[in-house]
Amino acid sequence: LTPQAVLVGAIVTVLAGIAIGLYLLTQSGPLLFWIGLGGVLVVITYTAGPFLLAYNGLGEAAVFIFMGPVMVLGAWYVMAREFSPLPLWVGVPIGFTVAAILHANNIRDIDADRAVNKRTMAVLLGRPAARIEYVVLIFGAYIGVVVLILAGIMPWMTLIAAVTLPEAWRLIQIITKSEDIGLLHQAQGRTARLHGDFGFWLVIGWLVWLIVLQFTSG
């Protein structure tokens, strides 16, 4: 894609998001405005403005927060029309996996980013520590589920997300042992699929819990 095409795509996407957000705002309450505003600011400051998040090691943190806990809170707020800290906690495991997608990308591009002074977290940490961060992000998702179950925030049925652990382990092996750009590129795409699969099975776990609750409470 040309830079112009990327710019047009970004503008169209942001405007579409704002339009959808304004509609949802009419169906919920003022908290959604601040969530949406925060999201727009992150999108803009990610690669634009005087302090670029992507160029100062804050990309993973921004993605973790806004595509994990904050996104889940927004969905909750639209439906429940009230604030609760619980969705923030529920969004933590997903925050880990979505941040892992970006981090896998940054590990793959570590040499190219360093050459143009793009200080991603991978560049700041160096390859060995960046690999450790990837492991922490991946396992953090599964550990997060266990902790939230033990805390009574998530039902034990969500442990079904552990069916994705074999693929997670395979990706860890690639990221921590390979410097082949082709393999790392594949690992980045597979991390995105892992994120989707992990989230899918979490939803299945929640649905099973709701069905069981419906029958047992009746």
Image: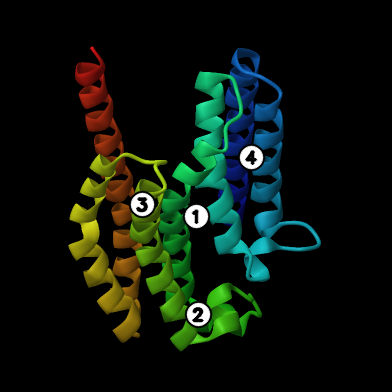
The numbered mark at residue 1 is: 1
Q: CA distance from mark 1 to mark 4?
A: 15 Å
The numbered mark at residue 145 is: 3
Q: Earlier in the sequence, mark 1 or mark 3?
A: 1
Q: CA distance from mark 2 to mark 4?
A: 28 Å
Residue 129 percent across, percent down from the top left? 48, 84
Residue 55, image quadrant:
bottom right
Q: Which residue is mark 4?
A: 11
- Mark 1, Cα crowd under 10 Å, few <14 / some 14-19 / many 20+, is few
| Residue for point 37% across, 64% down | 138
Q: Earlier in the sequence, mark 1 or mark 4?
A: 1
Q: CA distance from mark 2 to mark 3?
A: 30 Å
Q: Which residue is mark 2?
A: 110
- Mark 2, Cα crowd under 10 Å, few <14 / some 14-19 / many 20+, is many
| Left or right side of 144 for 218 | left
Q: Amino acid at mark 3?
A: Val
